[in-house]
């Protein structure tokens, strides 16, 4: 898909295609549509990220809260979005043993209790051991720093999803 095609989309089509670039936050795509035309794919991505950066902390935390846990209940119940399902599967999180799943659930619960939002990491680039290691490491970070780190992961997920949608290679988007 090229930038001319993106710029030609009406509101409904644009939100249909880009509504889940940021997990369960179609509002962001709805807002970004108004910024068209986009000069190129990087410009499109920049508008998604600028929207997130301009939000008050409550809005940024809200975005994090829209993310399902890694290897959590939604994965077990099969209620993940298609993108999340693919990402979690590619990280090996759909075939964990009971002990590993329980360990992650405990760490996720500790993280959420400390920060008030779920642990978010770009799963596509990861694996179960790395997820557990990152979770344990970030669990002790100062809240302000962890909010920035978590939003950085939301942007990595968004970058990979946009690259997938546009048929671009992630590095070159
Ligand atoms: N809590 C999360 O990090 N969730 C996710 N990371 C991904 O890459 N996809 C998700 O759903």
Image (spheres, helix red, strand yellow):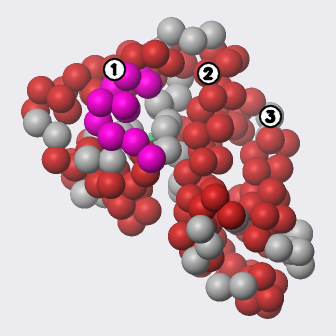
Q: Nearer the viewer, residue 97 or 67?
A: 97
Asked if disc 3 and disc 2 are in contact, CB closer than 8 Å, the reply is no
Q: Is residue 132 magenta?
A: yes
Quarter where residue 9 is shown = bottom right
The majority secondary structure of the magenta stretch comes to: helix
Residue 87 figure quarter: bottom left
Q: Is mark 1 within 8 Å of ligand 1?
A: no
Return the x and y of residue 162 as percentages of the image width and height.
62, 66
Where disc 1 sits, the SS reads helix
Quote the CA–CA distance across marks 3 and 1.
Answer: 27 Å
Circle 3 sits in a helix, a strand or a loop, which is it?
loop
Residue 156, placed above or below residue 37: above
Q: Residue at x 37, y 22 (%)?
A: 133
> In the figure, is residue 30 to the left or right of 97?
right
Mark 3 C-beta closer than 8 Å to ligand 1: no
Residue wearing tag 2: 146
Q: Which mark is residue 107?
A: 1
Which mark sits nearer the N-terminus, 2 or 1?
1
Characterize the local packing of mark 3: few (<14), some (14-19) or many (20 or more) Cα atoms within 10 angstroms: few
């Amino acid at each position: 898909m090229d930038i001319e095609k993106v710029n030609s989309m009406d509101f409904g089509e644009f939100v249909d295609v880009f509504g889940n670039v940021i997990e369960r936050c179609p509002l962001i795509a709805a807002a970004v549509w108004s910024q068209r035309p986009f000069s190129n794919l990087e410009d499109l991505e920049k508008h998604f990220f600028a929207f997130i950066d301009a939000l008050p902390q409550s809005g940024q935390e809200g975005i994090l809260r829209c993310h399902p846990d890694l290897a959590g209940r939604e994965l077990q119940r099969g209620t993940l979005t298609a993108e999340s399902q693919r990402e979690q599967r590619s990280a090996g999180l759909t075939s964990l043993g009971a002990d590993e799943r329980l360990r992650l659930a405990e760490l996720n619960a500790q993280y959420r209790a400390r920060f008030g939002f779920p642990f978010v990491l770009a799963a596509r680039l990861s694996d179960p051991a790395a997820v557990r290691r990152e979770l344990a490491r970030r669990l002790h970070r100062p809240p302000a720093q962890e909010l920035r780190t978590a939003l950085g992961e939301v942007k990595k997920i968004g970058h990979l999803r946009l690259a997938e949608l546009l048929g671009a290679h992630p590095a070159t988007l």
